[in-house]
Amino acid sequence: MAPLKEGSPVILGGALTVGSVTHVEIHQIEPTAQSGRKHPETVFAVRAEISPDVPLYGGCKITTDQPAIGGSGSVSILHVGVPGRELEQPIHGLPPQSLAAAISTLSRELLKEGGLVSQLNKAVDPEAPGSVLHKVLRSLDDVNAITASLRTEMNDNEQKALLGKIHASLDDLNGMTHILRGQMRPDNDAALLGKVHVALDHLAEGLSEAVATLKEDRPLVREALTSVRDVARSLDTELVASLRRELDSADKTSLLGKVHTGMDRVNAALADLKSIASTGQRVVTVSQPTLERTMQNFKDMSEQLRLASQEVLLNPSKLIWGPDARREEQMLVFQAARSFAEAARELDSATGRLEAVLHTLPPDGAVPEKAQAELRSISDGVRAAFERFELAETTLWDKLKEGM
């Protein structure tokens, strides 16, 4: 803002004074949702009185101005606004339009960090890697290095220089052409072309002798070719046809057909053996609990026979008079306990059989007819075991009630 104070004029259109400034102060404007700012803003609040003849409408444009040579500033009304549009106060002022303000703004833009002056200083700094002067100096250094290297390469007195190597290559080429010219002389027998002539002469002599030999032995050669033709015809008409017939896989009487038939029979036999092995394994796996139960029954029977024989040896009179009433009651309790044990053993056996059936099921989960029959048998065994449990429980309960 241009410097204002109380009494500073208010000018309309830069020519007509229509009022004066009455008060200048500093205000803090808090941020609002409409402003979009996050922090308070510090502004200059200027109060002025203008002539009633000058109407102000909404959209008016007001700024501050200052003489070019210096002095107090003034409030300048650039546009009175749009008639009929409501005026909203306070009126936000435009940037100052005085020469001093323009010079101040220009000086800030020129002298601020990253401004034009700072960028020019960086551009002409020979030490800054990105400056124009630094790049020019590096380019000149590269040019100097290239010219020095080129001057060294163009020295024909040095063998390592490019021009010296070119001279050496031309000298080698000159010597090679001289040697090649000497080798191309046909009158020199030691030269390459002379040796070629000699070799061609020997080749001509050999070809002449070969032609003469063929002329002399022409009947023998014809007989040999005739024999070879007859042998080839015999192989093609007799041996090859016989081999083709024996190697025909579609003909069962041929050698290859018989081999195929034999291999099919071997494969079928192997498939039968595999099926027999699989069936035997399944039978053993499924019947394993039954076999174990049979062996356990034999063991229990032998144990009972041993105990019975011992009891008879200790008291032979039991064979004549039998057990007394108290012994019979005990036997009933013992039989109930035995029923419990046998039912528990049958449940264990059913569990083992069920695991065996699960191991023999195919991977797709389908249950074969044999497995279904085995499952039904396992279910019947479990049902019978529970019936024994219930019978033993009823017997024991009755005995307990009689004892009470």
Image: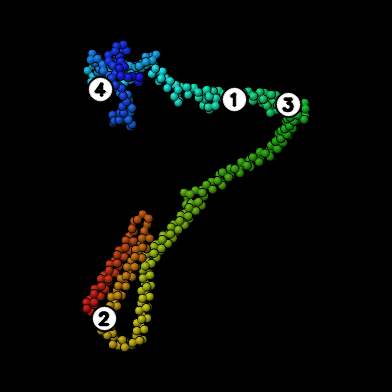
Q: Position of residue 214 (x, y in %)?
A: 70, 36
Residue at 51%, 49% in the rendered image: 247
Name the residue: 31% across, 86% down. Answer: 318
Mark 1 and mark 2: Cα distance apart in space: 124 Å
Q: Which mark is residue 175?
A: 3
Q: Earlier in the sequence, mark 1 or mark 3?
A: 1
Three-letter residue code for mark 3? Gly
Cα separation, mark 4 vs mark 1, equals 67 Å
Work out whether mark 3 precedes mark 4 in sequence or the reverse, and give the earlier one.
4
- Circles 1 and 3 in contact, beta carbons < 8 Å: no
In this rendering, is residue 339 above or below 314? above
**Residue 142: mark:** 1
Location of residue 252 in the rendering, given as x and y in whole percent from the top left corner: 47, 52
Neighbour tally class for label 1: few under 14, some 14-19, many 20 plus, Cα within 10 Å? few
Which residue is label 4 attached to?
88
* Dot 4 or dot 2, earlier in sequence: 4
Q: CA distance from mark 1 to mark 3?
A: 39 Å
- Label 1 sits on a secondary structure element that is helix
Viewer-side label of 4, 2: 4
State whether residue 80 is above or below residue 159.
Answer: above
Q: Element type at marker 3? A: helix
Q: Quadrant of residue 342?
A: bottom left
Is 404 located above or below residue 269 in the figure? below
| Viewer-side residue, 340 vs 88 | 88
Q: CA distance from mark 4 to mark 2?
A: 118 Å
* Nearer to the camera, 98 or 140: 98
Q: Is residue 256 above or below residue 166?
A: below
Q: Which of the marked residues, 1 or 2, is nearer the chain's N terminus?
A: 1
Residue position for label 2: 329
Residue 398 in view here: yes
Identify the amino acid type marked 1: Asp
How far apart are the alpha carbons under marks 2 and 3?
A: 136 Å
